[in-house]
Amino acid sequence: MTTTSPQAPDRAIAKALERWLRARARAVRAPLTGAVLAGAAAAVLLIGQAWLLARIIDAVVIHHLGLGQILPLVPPLLGVIVARALVAGLVPLAAFAAAARIRRDLRHALQTHITALGPAWVGTRRSGDLANTLVDGVDELEKYYADYLPQRSLMALIPLAMLAAVVPSDWVSALILCLTAPLIPFFMILIGKGTEALNQRQWRSLARMSAHVFDAIEGLTTLKLFNASRQEAATVARISEAYRSRTMKVLRVAFLSSLVLEFLTTLAIALVAVFIGFRLYYGQMQFLPGFFVLLLAPEFFRPLRDMGNHYHARMAAIGAAERIVDCLETPPPETTGTAPLPKVTRITFDRVGFLHEAGGQGVREVSFTLNRGECLALAGPTGAGKTTLAQLTLGFLVPQSGALRIDGADLATCAPDAWLRHVAWVPQAPTLFHGTIAENIRLGWPDAPPDAVEAAARAAAAHDFIVALPEGYQTRLGDGGEGLSGGERRRIALARALLKPADVLVLDEPTAALDPLTAARVIATIRDRARRQAVLLITHDPAAMRAADRILHLDRGRLVAPPTAGEAA
């Protein structure tokens, strides 16, 4: 049967993702090997347990021996049962240790790589999608390493050990087991191929749904203001219902595979039992080996059945790994510089160009100089490239053409961490973290004394509303500054930037969401800071523009002449 075109890429991707998953397992080879060896040892003890139990039953039922005659077999049986329970308990412990280590290392690698990609890359991704990848995506890999990989080895070792014990006792039953055993993995793979593609698509749907719901929650206040919350709730309900429907399709296939595995296993065990029963009836076989083989037959198929159940963990892991690999394989900005930075006095944009992949927006051949003691305002319509210039200044983006020079030295040759120590930033959408207001202000200077924190808050026009709170500077905030208005969050972010001892201050819409009186106080602070810092001010506020020493106008990524009075109107 030929593979349909939509499934072919999915299967090629699935193979590549499984190779990636197996490569990660090399780091935890020791605990995984321990889990496999413990499982194999438990299987050997199970064979011994079945043999001792068969001997006891044969002695009592067939040979009519008394308790005193079978008593010597009881302690070994109890010892084997206890030993098997202890060894079998080591399997999940060792497998979980391996999975937990991979989960910890992978989550750390993701966080480190996302940090290296920088805020500019994070800004192009949906928060819900990233959160889903970091949390649920990594957690979904645990069953692959804890269940699927050890079971894949045990699926081969345990049946071989069982066959080695069955062949001397009954070669006919061994032949039946050999002929029926391959049917289980065959049908498991046959059904699993379709489930594999469904799982990948289902995981992508989950990522999209998580991102949409996360974005809706973040914008709930805006939705309420525009009376659009009911419409958004209906949209979320429609997306959830579509996801539920797709989930049921995946479960139908999964239950079908489980039904097929159980049917084949039951049929094979029944076939062994029928052959043994007829031979016992006609006196062609003794009771002891026949009963021993019957005890082992269900255990022979157990690893194959377990593999069928854990096969779904493999498919789920492949679906989750797609987003993880996509993130890890995104190359970070090329920042190979190691040169230290002196005190910054001048920033020069020398024909700098940078175009974003999506939409081709950005800046083209921009040239200007920002000096210490100067406030430079960037003006222009939305999408003109102002934020891109700010991210280039911060080092979040690397120029694709031209050069950005710090006192004559190319920023690409400077150590990124060293440059960021010279820069303070207030983004257009400031982020506050769970913790006290004082801790949020101290983010750029953790050891700042209380009087410096208060001075920064006063300069940002934030002190008055902070001290009016029940616990003042020790008031705890929720994630994202929950409990504060947009203007209050912006002023705390400004206080954080003002507290940091930086040479360059980058402000993106610092007066947005502020009343005119508070905005005037903030503008006065910016003018004061511009006497000893280099201030890059991005704003649409005419009052803030008038406070700047120079105004550069951007349009479609290029510096242009300022609009005339008629054009401005």
Image (cartoon, rainbow, N blue to C red):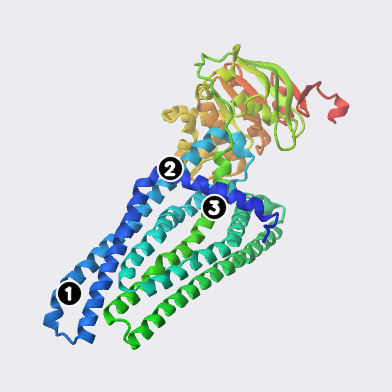
Which SS class for mark 1?
Answer: helix
Question: Type of residue at label 2?
Answer: Asp
Q: Quick one: label 2, few (<14), some, or many (20+) residues within 10 Å?
A: some
x and y, in percent, of residue 479 in the image = 52, 46
Q: Amino acid at mark 3?
A: Ile
Q: Quadrant location of residue 393?
A: top right
CA–CA distance in space, label 2 to label 3: 18 Å
- The answer to whether residue 477 shows anywhere in this view is yes
* Residue named by callout 1: 74
Residue depicted at 44% across the width and 47% down the height:
103
Work out which quarter of the rendered image holds the C terminus and state it.
top right
Image quarter in which the N terminus is found: bottom right
**Of label 3 and label 1, which has the lower sequence position?**
1
Q: Is residue 254 above or below residue 320?
A: below
Give whichever of discs 2 and 3 has the lower sequence position.
2
Measuring from the top left, give residue 308's x and y in whole percent.
48, 64
Judging from the image, what secondary structure is the residue with disc 3 in? helix
Instruction: Using the rendered view, name the quadrant where residue 252 is placed.
Output: bottom right
Residue at image location 47% in from the left, 30% down from the top: 453
Mark 3 Cα within 10 Å, few/some/many (few <14, many 20+)?
A: many
Q: Position of residue 15 (x, y in %)?
A: 56, 50
Counting every numbered tag in the picture gives 3
Badge 1 amino acid: Val
Which residue is identified by label 3? 318
Nearest the viewer among 330 and 162 is 162
Observer-side mark, 1 or 2, equals: 1
Left or right of residue 74, residue 277 in this image: right
Foreground tag (2 vs 3):
3
- Mark 3 to mark 1: distance in Å? 48 Å
Question: Which numbered tag is attached to residue 105?
Answer: 2
Secondary structure at numbered mark 2: helix
